[in-house]
Amino acid sequence: MTLFCVEIRSPSEQVFKGDVQMIIAPGSDGDLGLLANHMPIITMLRQGQIILKMPNGTPDQSFAIDGGYLSMANDLCSILTVDGSTASDDVQR
């Protein structure tokens, strides 16, 4: 499966940057599933969970976000969020 780059950023840090097989994100009108070579898109995100399907049998990663924006073009998916944390961070809070 073809990979593409995902960047998740908050104002204070880069939460994630790496190659993934698929991303599932909480779009404002419903969940989005994006793969490599997806047509360009810009959308608002609602509060929820981003799931990254990782390559080579690596466990999936998930991040809780508090809304934001997603853009995808030329196999680069950028997510800007006010607050993003890994699922394990949420358990520790």
Image (cartoon, helix red, strand yellow):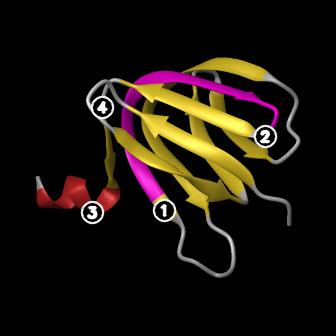
Mark 4, residue position: 83
Residue 37 horizontal side relative to residue 42, left or right: right
Q: Quadrant of residue 87?
A: bottom left
Task: Tell me which amino acid carries mark 2.
Answer: Asp
Residue 19 picture quarter: bottom right
Nearer to us of marks 2 and 1 is 2
Residue at image point 82% right, 48% down? 36
Residue 78, image x and y in percent? 59, 32
**How far across and how far down the image is residue 43, in percent?**
64, 18
Residue numbers of the magenta segment? 62-74
Residue carrying label 1: 61
Looking at the image, is 56 positioned above or below residue 4? below
What residue sits 48% from the left and 39% below the top?
8
- Badge 3 density bin: few <14, some 14–19, many ≥20, Cα 10 Å: few
Q: Position of residue 2 (x, y in %)?
A: 85, 60
Disc sitting over residue 81 in the figure: none
| Relative horizontal placement of residue 38, taking residue 49 as reference (left or right) | right
Per the picture, the main secondary structure of the magenta-coloured stretch is strand
Does the residue at mark 1 contact the one at mark 3 (Cβ under 8 Å)?
no
Of mark 2 and mark 4, the one earlier in the sequence is 2
Q: Earlier in the sequence, mark 3 or mark 2?
A: 2
